[in-house]
Amino acid sequence: DTSWDAMFALLLQFKTKNGHCNVPRRHAEQGKSLGDWVSKQRFKKSKAALEQRRVDLLEQAGFEWNLNDKSWDAMLALLLQFKTKNAHCNVPSKHVKQGKALGQWVGNQRFKKG
C-alpha cells in the first residue's frame, strides 16, 4: 500500500530529525497527519489488525508500541535515584526531579495498589 509506505517514510524522516519515533498526536509532516497515523498503527496492533510485515518494519525503525511502559520505567529510575540519595522512598508529594512530578507519581502508585 503506497500511502502506508509514504507515511512510514515520513516517520523515518521524523526519526532522523528527532532521534525517536514518538510523534506527538497533532504533529504533521509535509501536510500529512503523522501523529494520527502513528496512533492508528498502535491501535491497529493492539487489535491484532496490523500486518506482521508492517509491525516488523516499525519495530526495525525503533517504534515503541506502549509509551506508558517507557514512562513508568523512567519514573521508577528516578525513584531509585531518590532512594539511593535519601535511603527511603517516602517522596514528598510536591517533589519534582528532572522536570517530572516524582512525588505525585509515587502517590499515584500507592493509590493504585490500594
Image (cartoon, rainbow, N blue to C red):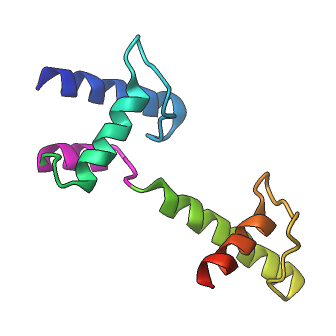
Closer to the camera, 5 or 90?
Answer: 90
Q: Residue at x 68, y 71 (%)?
A: 108
Left/right placement of residue 111 relative to residue 93 reads left
Q: Residue furthest bottom?
A: 87
Segment colored magenta: 52-65
Q: Where is residue 113 drawn, in percent x and y? A: 60, 83
38 horizontally vs 20: left or right:
left
Give x and y (percent) for residue 67.
Answer: 48, 54
Location of the C terminus by quadrant is bottom right
Is 108 magenta? The answer is: no
Query: Residue at coordinates 14% horizontally, 21% vertically from top-left?
Result: 2
- In the rendered view, would you say 18 is above or below 108? above
Residue 4 on image: x %, y %: 20, 28
Q: In the picture provided, is 67 more to the left or to the right than 88? A: left
| Quadrant position of the N terminus in the picture | top left
Does 3 sit above or below residue 112? Answer: above
